Image (spheres, rainbow, N blue to C red):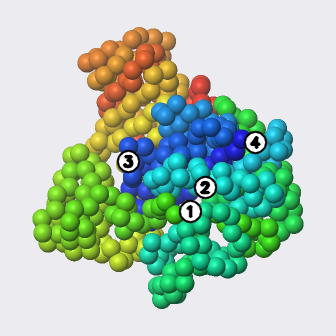
Amino acid sequence: MTIVPILLCGGSGTRLWPLSRKSYPKQFARLAGDDTMLQASVKRLTGEGFAAPVVLTNSDFRFIVTEQLAEIGVDPGAILIEPEGRNTAPAVLAAALWLAQTDPDAMMLVAPSDHVISDAEAFQEAVMIGREAANDGKLVTFGITPTHPETAYGYLELFNNPNGSTHPLDLVAFIEKPDAGRAAEMLATGRFLWNAGIFLFSVQTIIEAFRTHAPGLMASVQGAVEQGKPDLGFLRLDPAAWSEAEDISIDYAVMERADNLAVVPFHAGWTDLGGWPSVRRETKQDEKGVALKGLASAIDCEDTLLWSEDDAVALVGVGLQNIVAVAMPDAVLVADASRAEDVKKAVCELKRLGVRQAEEFPTDHRPWGPFQSLATGDRFQVKRIIVHPGASLSLQSHHHRAEHWIVVAGTAKVVIGDNEQLVAENQSVYIPLGTKHRLENPGKLPVTLIEVQTGAYLGEDDIIRYEDIYARGQGAKG
């Protein structure tokens, strides 16, 4: 029996701000290696014994997911679109009910898409060890051998110290995130593992567990799946039914109430990169504990992370100790590493002040490609736009702005009014205010262009859309 990976990819965490934001969270970033965290998660669950992955995400991320999977040559089994975030219990139940329609005997491996597991082979071995218990009707979870008294994770309590065992063990209790003293006490006993939030069970077992322990979720989630609408290869869960589902985690809804649990200890290393100190631990350090990323330099620093995400931004630390400094094109974070958890408070304050950088990423992603605002001023804005091969912007017009397009790489097919033309590198076109226009990339290489907007209002919502191959409605961006 093959295992169907279920990747949860709808989160919008703020603990890694400014690199992770609501519009582009950490699962899409390259925080530990050349792959994004989503890509690394998918690769880890690919190969013999694994079916094509099923991804649950939200509407804003659906094209980012398909783009990143295409980059690594993975065709997902399905992408389910959550109308709004309702936590992990409804998401897992939706995946189980969807699979039950076509493969009721399937085995599900539920995993977040933003974890780091460096030894993928060891993790696959742990999954295969847990499969026997799952076949016997167990709800299998995976517990990580702690390396330090972490306060940002929940724990799993065992009856005995596993002493290096990798076989499924019985679980005593789920433990909420402890304070530092309690975490140290638990670590000393050897009977506690970190709760990784990774689960393995059969479709029928988990559906029965929901019927028994969280029956209130069944009608709303089943309605959302059965009334879901296909949308360009995605399944968009029904918004009305989905809104009735309780916002609750699978731990609270099922796992803490079930008595058919098993835990597979995993000793080969894991982190959810829940904050900048954990990123520093996963980044190569020098003899003084200094980790550098990008155009960053350290002089007489200790136990410090200096991270520059922009080749045009040089970040230099002098005489720093226990500091996290992260530089983005539009925002900079400087914090004592011991206060890294307070980054969430900083984001809340920025939101209160109406600061765009609180949630919006400097690069905006559309189904046809990314764009970045390079300069803005009174009545003008300059953007760099990349259009993927075969992709197309919608046929659109604007009430308040005119545009100049200058192609700097590739060849674009441009429609302006009734005129259609090819615009090659170093050529430009002008789109008058109110004129219907569209740009397509008919070639096999990306098209890069500079767009200069002029007008009284330059907001992304100034768009009248006439045709769109991505089936976006009026008012949708791009």
Residue under pointer 2: 126
Q: CA distance from mark 4 to mark 2?
A: 16 Å
Residue 236 visible from this viewpoint = no
Residue under pointer 3: 33
Q: What is the secondary structure assignment of the residue under circle 1?
A: strand
Q: What is the secondary structure assignment of the residue under circle 3?
A: loop
> Any mark on residue 1, and which?
4
Contact flag, marks 4 and 1 (Cβ < 8 Å): no
Comparing 131 with 181, the one in front is: 131
Q: What is the secondary structure assignment of the residue under circle 4?
A: loop
Sooner in the amino-acid sequence: mark 3 or mark 2: 3
**Residue 243 x/y as whole percent:** 74, 57
Mark whose residue sits in front, 1 or 3: 1
Q: Amino acid at mark 1?
A: Phe
> Any mark on residue 266, and which?
1
Sooner in the amino-acid sequence: mark 4 or mark 1: 4
Mark 2 surroundings: few (<14), some (14-19) or many (≥20) residues within 10 A? many
Contact flag, marks 3 and 4 (Cβ < 8 Å): no
Residue 29 visible from this viewpoint = yes
Q: Is residue 37 left or right of residue 445?
A: right
Q: CA distance from mark 3 to mark 2?
A: 23 Å
> Any mark on residue 440, and which?
none
Q: What is the secondary structure assignment of the residue under circle 2?
A: helix
Q: Amino acid at mark 3?
A: Gly
Contact flag, marks 1 and 2 (Cβ < 8 Å): yes
Q: CA distance from mark 1 to mark 2?
A: 7 Å
